[in-house]
């Protein structure tokens, strides 16, 4: 979970630098770089969440010894569903932002902050519903090496 939490944190950090408008070439170029970065983190998230062993690894949270982290089986199922839903939302969100960037740059400001808020409400910040769960490492380093294709993200995971 801490690797998933890291990816979500990185998406929020990158999105925080998003320009408020994309009416200039400079801001459009910056937005393209940011969207590409978010896509890379989304790809890594997908690799972690879609891994066939992930759901069974989540059940480790039922027996966690970390204070405040002991989920019931139905909560594990809900968390798994929430993470799968997050992947869908990220994909749709990125598609919409690319379309807005290309065809409707005047609508950019209305959409650019929504993803950060959604991630923060469910998964992040001090009040995030699942903040404690992101302290648990579900994958061993050898598993991560097999799952994650981004060498940059893998290097960051090894530091956690």
Image: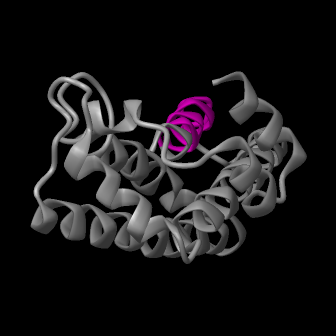
Would you say residue 120 is visible in this rendering? yes
Would you say residue 131 is visible in this rendering? no
Task: Decide which of 78, 143 is in the foreground and name it.
Answer: 143
- Above or below residue 5? Residue 111 is below
Q: Main secondary structure of the magenta part?
A: helix
- Above or below residue 40? Residue 4 is above
> Quadrant of the rendered structure where residue 133 is?
top left
> Quadrant of the rendered structure where residue 77 is?
bottom left
**Quadrant of image for the C terminus:** top right
Task: Decide which of 25, 30 is in the foreground and name it.
Answer: 30
| Residue 16 within the magenta-colored segment of the rendering | yes
| Residue 160 within the magenta-colored segment of the rendering | no
- Above or below residue 29? Residue 134 is above
Residue at image location 59% in from the left, 67% down from the top: 46
Residue at image location 15% in from the left, 29% down from the top: 68
Query: Left of 145 or right of it: where is 56?
Result: left
Q: Position of residue 43 (x, y in %)?
A: 68, 63
Q: Position of residue 90 (x, y in %)?
A: 50, 65
> Quadrant of the rendered structure where residue 140 is?
top right
Task: Decide which of 146, 15 is in the foreground and name it.
Answer: 146
Residue at image location 72% in from the left, 22% down from the top: 159
Residue at image location 74% in from the left, 40% down from the top: 27
Query: Left of 144 or right of it: where is 122?
Result: left
Q: Which residues are drawn in magenta?
A: 5-20
Task: Decide which of 59, 150 is in the foreground and name it.
Answer: 59
Q: Position of residue 1 (x, y in %)?
A: 45, 45
Query: Left of 10 or right of it: where is 147?
Result: right
Q: Position of residue 143 (x, y in %)?
A: 70, 55
Q: Residue furthest right?
A: 151
């Amino acid at each position: 979970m801490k690797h998933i939490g890291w990816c979500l944190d990185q998406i929020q950090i990158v999105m925080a630098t998003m320009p408020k408008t994309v009416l200039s070439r400079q801001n459009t170029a910056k937005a393209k770089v940011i969207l590409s970065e978010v896509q890379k983190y989304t790809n890594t998230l997908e690799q972690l969440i879609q891994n066939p062993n992930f759901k069974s690894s989540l059940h480790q949270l039922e027996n966690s010894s970390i204070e405040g982290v002991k989920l019931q089986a139905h909560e594990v199922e809900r968390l798994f569903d929430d993470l799968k839903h997050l992947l869908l939302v990220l994909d749709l969100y990125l598609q919409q932002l690319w379309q807005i960037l290309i065809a409707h740059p005047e609508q950019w400001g209305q959409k650019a902050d929504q993803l950060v808020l959604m991630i923060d409400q469910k998964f992040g910040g001090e009040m995030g519903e699942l903040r404690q769960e992101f302290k648990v490492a579900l994958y061993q380093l050898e598993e991560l090496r097999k799952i994650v294709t981004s060498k940059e993200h893998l290097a960051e995971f090894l530091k956690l």
